[in-house]
Structures are given as structure tokens and as C-alpha cells.
Image (tube, helix red, strand yellow):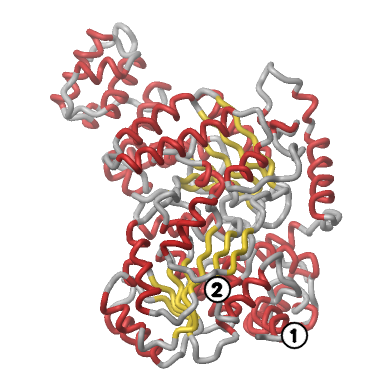
Amino acid sequence: MAADNELGGALRRYWGYESFRPMQERVVRSLLAGKDTCVIMPTGGGKSLCYQLPAALLPEKTAVVVSPLIALMQDQVAQLEQIGITSAVLNSTLDARQQEQVMRRAREGKYRLLYLSPERLAREDALAWLQRVPVAYFVIDEAHCISEWGHEFRPEYRQLSRLRERFPDFPIAAFTASATRRVRHDIIEQLHLRDPHKYIASFHRPNLRYSAMQCDSTSQTALLLNALRSYQQGNVIVYAPTIKQVEFTADYLEERGIPAVAYHGQMDAKRRRTNQERWMADEVRVLVGTIAFGLGINKAAVRAVIHLALPKSLEQYYQEAGRAGRDGLPSDCVLLWQQRDIGLLTYFIQQITDPAERDRAWQRCGDIRRYAESKGCRPWQICEHFGETPKWKTCGACDACGFRPAWLVETGAEDYAAYKPKRKRKAAAAVQQVLTGAPAAPAVDLALMNFMREWRREAALKQGVPAFVVMHDTSLEDLCRVAPRTLDELRTVSGFGEYKTKTYGRQILEALARFQQGARATTPSAAKPKPAEETLQFLAEGKTLEEIARLRGRKVSTVMALVAEMVERGDLTFDRRWIDADKLSQIEAACQQHRTAVLRRLKDALPAAITYDEIRLVAAYLRARPPDAKP
């Protein structure tokens, strides 16, 4: 068993932290003692360190980590390499020669951690090869995926039950952020964990302020705009239910002067990665995404997570909303839902053919609907859902307990003056002091923060790694607060262990010295044109709608919707070449017969091959055309 000074020394040496977070040290000791372990720890609780630190202390042994996403594995390995812990990922992104090299080095015990996908572990040849690797223990990350009761069940995870059969003498550790009591029991049963040490942290994160509100599409859009204009610092995640709404929302915000990027699964991988990196590096503050975004995202200063539709389960909502406030500061988790969301969830549930899975989906739908419609304390409901019974009944920091962000006040329904920004800021500081037991941290020089953020971005680009791999947001803020002048002072900054100080220390001190001598962040080059301006520019160059969609990284339907809006406003002249001539004549005839207001009526009257987007574009043109104009 490792001594206290050995664990503390490793924590400082590699991660640059002075102390463990709650529960971390106990989990580390369980793994070092060779015990099966089941850990339920909320997002931001520091799960990764729990299995990475013991691996760093086991020379010539390898912790095998099963992770569901390639990008997540790559980021984890990049971060470990930055702090001097040898690790590797073995997946389909490597060519045959690279895979063979990783496999050979793994057999030689060169890696402290090795990341694999559940699909690879399902292969017989992979299991046979692993038996020649000096394994220390197995880690199953996102372990709720193994349970049919989990909200992200993945059949390939079920085959991980073979690990106990093929490696009976090695410990297995399961980690997840969101598992109900039933899911926890299923994880232990499916993985055949033997008398596991169980660590279940509280599901209550007191710095998160929950609100939910039913609205219509018009008020939802207005509220979102108010929200994003109110958060002057930090980042925001907006979750939208469909790809179309993701792209529409991102363009809508850009048109109104709020830089935003889109993220969804059908976007090409390079653009998706670029957009994520721009958001992570604070080049844009707002990311609009589907549920494809977020797993493994380690960004501390997310001040709000706003959902524009009901998620499919309370577990999913808790996991996504929990990406807010990882730095411990007050942050908002807001659910802006519409009645039609229930119909959409119902539709998808009815498509499920397996009766048992359909019943589970109905149960999850009921849980999230009750949460959205309830007038009771929201953190209490979350805790109760996950099997925790809080000793308190009201949190004092959700809408049911009297708190609401100023921008969420319904126009005409409440006194907006009661939520003046000054009062809100004072309340936020008070909440932080009460909840964390410490006064708010002193303000950071924003000019210095912008300068060092630019340095971080450039350092990351040179190495081809994400900006947060070079330095986490919390470390960046602490660095600017301390403003060290020596390497010893730099080591007092949170997140700067020996390896990272050696790698970046001199560069950082030189950058800080340049700032003191008057250097500042460079002014960004010409701002990117707004979506409408960019689209008009491409049209003027003779580009087709399909070409514009490809150039802008959007679906054709999104471009057509924007073009229709500009045509109806009179900002753009309709071009009959945009629509096939035969389709155009059919849509015009249907519009004359059925009027142009109700698209559903027009769709029903036209051939199935004619899309809503084509109908919308022609209808916009006809509405904008003067009554006496010739077609």
C-alpha cells in the first residue's frame, strides 16, 4: 500500500495539485490494493485521476482503459503525455504499422495506461494479445453503457463481461457519472465484480442553479438571445434536439452578433473537431450542439448549459447539464422546453420494437416530464432519482426555491426590476461564499488573461493538440492571478507539476515578462461575415445552394431556410434556377390553390419527392412578390 507522502508526491509531481478532491484518494488506494471497484462520481469530480494516478505508480504495469469514443481516448492520452505519463491509444485511427508498434510496446510494459474501445475488446485476437501484456487492472469508463437500464446502453459493452472470464486475477474498476441504483447493481452484475469497493458521491452540485420553463418557439428564441447576451464571461453550451435546429440556432445567433459554432454527428470530422477546438480555446463563447457533443469535455468555465428541448431521460439531462460550473463557481442549467417535445419523444419511443426497451423508454420519458413540470426543488428531485435522499428539502438556488436568472423572467408575468444585474452579481458572489466556504477569488486582469489565452492557443497549434491539453482553464486563471516570476512560483499554480513546469515554464515566464513590458493580445483579423452576408457573397460568385452548404459546413436545408428568409424580407431576389422547373411549377400551383401559410397542407398536396425546404423557399418568394407581378 502506498504511503501518504507517495500519493501526495505523485499528485503534485504529475498533476500539480496540493490535495485530493473528496473520495479520490480512497478510490486510488482501492485500485493500488487490487480491489474491484465501482465509482459513481458526478461530472467534474475528477474520475480520470482516480485510475490514472495508481497507474503512474506501477512501473512496468499497464492499466487498460475501455472508453467509448475515439476523440475522448486521444484527448486523454495527449493530456497524460503532457504531464509525463507514458500512455497510448489503440484504435482504427492508426495504420497497421502504428498499431503493431503500440502492441509491441504494450507487451514490453512501456505504457502506464492503454486505451481501447469496447469493440476491439470483443475481438478474440485482441483478448489473446492482451494476455501477453503486463496488465495492472482494467478500467471501464462510462460504465452505465453496459446496462440496459442505462440511458446510453451500447450492446458492445455487454461483451466486457468476458474480461472476468479471461482475466480472472485482475481487478476491474467501473466508473460513471450518472447511474441510478438499478443501473449500479446491473454494472456490478454484468462485469462480475467481486465484493467491489463502492464509492458513490453525492449527486448534488450546490454551485449549479437549475431552472425549467415551458415556452413556444418564439419565446424560446427570444429567451435564448437574452440569455447569451447576459453571460459576459465564460462559455455557454446550447443543446438543440435536431441537426437542423443546431444549424439554424448557430446561424441565428451569428446574425445577431453572438459568435457561435455548431456541432453535430453529420458534420465532417475535421470541421467538427475545429469547431470544438475554437470553443475550447475561447475563440467563440457559444457552442450549439446535439447530444453528440460533450462526452469527455473538460472545460471549467462553462457558465450555462441551456437545453432547447426535453432530453430523453433525466440521466441524460443530469450528465449534459453537469458540464456547467466545473470550476465550482455559480452556473445555470436551464431547460427551455415546448409541448411538442413530448410528441417527439413519444414518436421515437413508438419506433422501438423491443417491448422491454420500449417500456424502459416510457419510464425515462415520464421521469424527465415530471422533472420539467414539477414545482418541487430540482436538485432534490435529481438526488432522489439517483437513489440519494438529501437531508434538506429546498436548495435555495433553483427556480422552485426562489431563484431565477434575470433573463428568464417572463415578460409581463413578473417584476423584472426584482432581478437587476447588480443584485444578481451580488447574489452569485454570496452563493459562492456560502457553498464553497470561501470568499470569491480576486478578479483577474482580463488583458493578461486574453494575452495568455492567445499564448496557450499558439502553443497548442505548434504541437497539434487541443488548447486545454496545454493548460486547463482553471490553471490559466490561477496563472494570471499569481503572475509568477520564477519557476518556483510557477509550481504553486494549480495544474503545474514538474513535467509541465519543465516543458512550458521558461516560455510562460517570458510571455508574462512581455506582457509586463506592454505586449497585448493581437487584435483578431477581419471578423468572419455573418451567415446571411456570407451566403449573399457566395450567390454573387455564382455558387449553387449545394456548393454554399458545403463551403459553410451546413446542410442544404439550412441554407435554403436562410435563403427563404432573405427572399421574404426582400434582401434577395428569388432565382428560379434554385428549384427544378417542374417542381417549381407544381409548388406554385399548389400555393395558388391552398394559399402559402400552412406548409403541411402544401406538403400533403404535392408529390413526396418535393421537400419542405423547397416548398418553404417558393412560398417565401410568392409571399414577397407584389400582387400584380408576373411569375
The mark nearer the N terminus, 2 or 1, is: 1
* Dot in front, 2 or 1: 1
Q: Position of residue 292 (x, y in %)?
A: 43, 51
The reply to whether residue 245 is in sight is yes
Compared with 523, 206 (above or below) is: above
Q: Mark 2 points at which residue?
A: 79
Q: Where is residue 471 in the image (x, y as percent from the top left)?
A: 63, 69
Tell whether 256 sits left or right of 263: right
Q: Mark 1 points at which residue?
A: 5
Residue type (three-letter) at the residue carrying disc 2: Gln
Quadrant where the image shows the N terminus: bottom right
Q: Residue at x 41, y 79 (%)?
A: 168
Tell whether 259 sits left or right of 165: right
Q: Which residue lies furthest to the front in this view?
A: 195
Q: Is mark 2 on a helix, strand or loop?
A: helix
Out of 295 and 178, give the one closest to the viewer.
178
Compared with 241, 460 (above or below) is: below
Q: Residue at x 54, y 70 (%)?
A: 195
Residue 258, quarter of the rendered image: top right
Compared with 582, 106 (above or below) is: below
Distance from Cα at disc 2 to Cα at disc 1: 24 Å
Q: Residue furthest right?
A: 439
